[in-house]
Image (cartoon, rainbow, N blue to C red):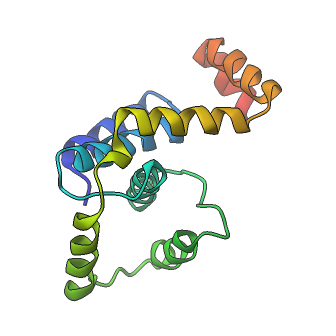
Amino acid sequence: MPEKETIERAQKDAREGKAPTTQAGEFVREEVHHVREGKHGVRGPKQAIAIGLSKARKAGVKVPPAPRGTASAQRENRSHRSSRRTRPSKKRSQTRLRAMKKEGRSGASRQALSRQAKTAARRRSSSSRSQAARRASRPRALRKRARS
């Protein structure tokens, strides 16, 4: 369950008309903090990001669904689609947390997240990156017009 502050920050971003990915960033940020303070561990930076995005989707942020081939995508699509939420199994929740506590903390380190960001950026084409920069430098009113 995301913290109240995180949800409020994401809602503030939504009111300001910021992109869904920016709103979801608050949830990812919270997850990274959880790992750093020792609430649980992660196998790598991608896992911390995935957990944060999943929480954002559950909270109603309109983030695109997870890539289709991944295990989390199939699980997520099933659980988030249903309108009637059933309570999660206590045993399963405890087991999941116990397993995550055994994972390392270095997956959310500054270096690991930096490495992840660099490789993600490297995968994008230069035209895609420059288009994003151009879009970001435009005034917000123009950005909204261009989207619709």
| Residue 60 percent location from the top left of the image | 43, 56
Looking at the figure, which quarter contains the N terminus?
A: bottom left
Tell which of 52 and 107 is nearer to you.
107
Residue at point 28%, 57% (across, down): 41
Query: Compared to 142, does 106 lie above or below?
Result: below
Report whether residue 64 is seen: yes
Relative to 81, is 127 on the left or the right? right
* Residue at the image point whose x is 20% and y is 85% from the top: 90
Q: Quick check: 137 left or right of 95? A: right
Q: As rendered, which of 58 and 70 lies closer to the eye?
A: 70
Viewer can see residue 27: no
Residue at (23, 71) in percent of width and height: 97
Residue 13 placement: quadrant: top left
Residue 16 horizontal/vertical position (percent): 44, 27
State the image coordinates of residue 50 (x, y, percent, origin top left): 46, 56
54 over 81 or under it: above or below? above
Is 94 left, or right, of 45 in this rendering?
A: left
Q: Quadrant of residue 14?
A: top left
Q: Note whether 103 is above or below 27 in the view shown.
A: below
Q: Nearer the viewer, residue 32 or 146?
A: 32
Quarter residue 43 falls in = bottom left
Q: Percent x, y for residue 88?
A: 28, 82
Tell how many labels.
Answer: 0
Taking depth in this image into account, of 103 and 55 the one nearest to the observer is: 103
**Looking at the rendering, in which quadrant would you find the C terminus?**
top right
Q: Is residue 115 above or below residue 68?
A: above
What residue is shown at x 50% (from left), y 71% (from top)? 76
Q: Is residue 133 left or right of residue 115?
A: right
